[in-house]
Amino acid sequence: MTSQTRILIKGGKIVNDDCSRITDVYIEDGIIKDVGLNLQVPGGVRVIDATDKLVIPGGIDTHTHMELAFMGTQAVDDFYIGTKAALAGGTTMILDFAIPQRGASLLEAFDKWRSCADPKACCDYSLHIAVTWWSEKVKEDMEILVQEKGINSFKMFMAYKDVFMLRDHELYAAFSQCKDIGAIAQVHAENGDLIAEGAKKMLAMGITGPEGHELCRPEEVEAEATQRAITIAHSVNCPLYVVHVMSKSAAKVVANSRREGKVVFGEPIAAGLGTDGTHYWNKDWAHAAKFVMGPPLRPDPSTPGYLMDLLANDDLSVTGTDNCTFSTCQKALGKDDFTKIPNGVNGVEDRMSVIWEKGVYSGKMDENRFVAVTSTNAAKIFNLYPRKGTIAKGSDADIVVWDPIATRTISAKTHHQAVDYNIFEGMVCHGVPVVTISRGRVVYEDGVLHASPGEGRYIPRKPFSEFVYKRIQQRDMVSQPKPVEREPYKGEVFSLAAKNGTSRPGGRGLHQSTFTLSGDAVEGSPSPPHSSKRVMAPPGGKSSIVF
């Protein structure tokens, strides 16, 4: 056994989501073997001095799109470059999205993403599966993925009309299936119909630049879809996870729903917490296009601070990045039409520092909440806890030694991602990773990466996460509607069957009215025709309505 597999972290402050304490951590064979002071450890152990540093669980990025083929091109961060950059930023696990084309097999999409990720991933990863169409076959695939492939989350799109978008009845069916198999339903919440019409309107007005992207999908389009998704999910008692909450309006919908007792989780992303949509109006087209993503960043400059406030106070729950990077020349596919600009931004490397700067350093949240929103809550929601998301005996040795005082300036010139720009360019961040440990190995130290492709592993997840499903299952037990017990009705029942031109009993059938909009009587009616009728004094008050 080498010193690489035995590590003692000494003198640091261990920070979990619930408490902080100064103590030591002993790692062996990729697992945290012990936590405490004056630990008895074997000889030949590598010692990492964490004095005056924080020792935190490795970050979990809940939302990435590595090497995604989208809008006619492919994201430049593949699973090797993307996960290597993640480790440099203090993230030790990503959850990526396997997205089948409309009509394609979900199982085949899972296999395709595994074949891409397994030989390249430098850190552990898992997968969400997108449901881009609906059929009995999709329903069957979902159950197989949960039972045999370790999937417990499925994403539905309410945007990208005619590509990925599901209609309300399909959402209802998909949410119902998620509930039955113990998965969490995720939604990209935007009204796809309104976006399609808005895009046509902007182009017809001669607005072809990146500003048109935001103008055709304003925040009320996001808020409406968020409310609709929560309503549909609640109607079937299905837990809901709203990905990339980008606007104040949508965030308010999530926050209010949580306060009403609905089981819903909101995920703001690093981009929405660290910058805003004023960039879409920049005179430099290339600069403006860098920020194009869906839903868009919001031009209200108070939005990032508002989202951070809600994140700090548990109205929003967890953070991802929606890391889906396209180079400047790829973005230029939409130089004459904003609808053709590939949607996506960077963030996987900078998420931890941006949230520390905008959240902890600013005084909006403490170090424990930082751990919760960057790691622990994700582990609990997606049933990875306590294997991931905490520093405890028996947990995976995914650990970051974090310097809360040191600063770094974010720049495309120094980042480890493949994309040729950075939406956080020039931002000075307090809080930087000094050492990143993944699977018990030091993979980043003092600015130098030691990560290799294929060292990460696919992590299967079980269904029915207790953190998500405890309330759901209890409500199923106690809140099911029941029929009212009553004596059967024994009176006369009106007959709708016509006999000899009349309905029984007595009275004329309502479907046999002699009224017409023209005022003419139906043939055979004894009433003479009138050019109009004036109702002068109906019950309830006077009227002068003329038909």
Image (tube, rainbow, N blue to C red):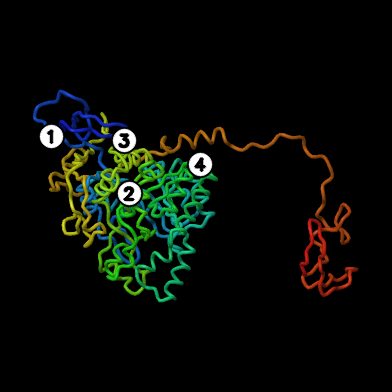
Query: Residues under labels 4 and 1: Cα distance?
Result: 47 Å
Q: Quadrant of residue 148?
A: top left
Residue at 40%, 59% in the rendered image = 101
For the residue labelled by badge 3, is the local secondary structure a helix, a strand or a loop?
loop
Query: Residues under labels 3 and 1: Cα distance?
Result: 22 Å
For the residue labelled by badge 4, is the local secondary structure a helix, a strand or a loop?
loop
Q: Which mark is residue 260?
A: 4
| Of the two numbered discs 3 and 2 in the rendering, the one whose residue sits closer to the viewer | 3
| Of the two numbered discs 4 and 1 in the rendering, the one whose residue sits closer to the viewer | 4
Q: Which mark is residue 49?
A: 1
Mark 3 — residue?
17
Which tag, 2 or 1, sits closer to the chain's start? 1
Which tag, 4 or 2, sits closer to the chain's start? 4
Most foreground residue, 422 or 59: 422
Going by the numbered disc 4, the residue's amino acid type is Glu
For the residue labelled by badge 2, is the local secondary structure a helix, a strand or a loop?
loop
Q: Is residue 124 visible?
A: no
Q: Which mark is residue 195?
A: none
Which tag, 3 or 1, sits closer to the chain's start? 3
Q: Residues within 10 Å of mark 2 (few under 14, many from 20)?
A: many
Going by the numbered disc 3, the residue's amino acid type is Asp
Q: Quadrant of the N terminus?
A: top left
Q: Residue furthest left?
A: 44
Q: Is residue 420 above or below residue 494?
A: below
| Of the two numbered discs 4 and 2 in the rendering, the one whose residue sits closer to the viewer | 4
Most foreground residue, 535 or 103: 535
**Percent position (x, y) of residue 429?**
22, 49
Q: Is residue 255 left or right of residue 543?
A: left
Mark 2 — residue?
320
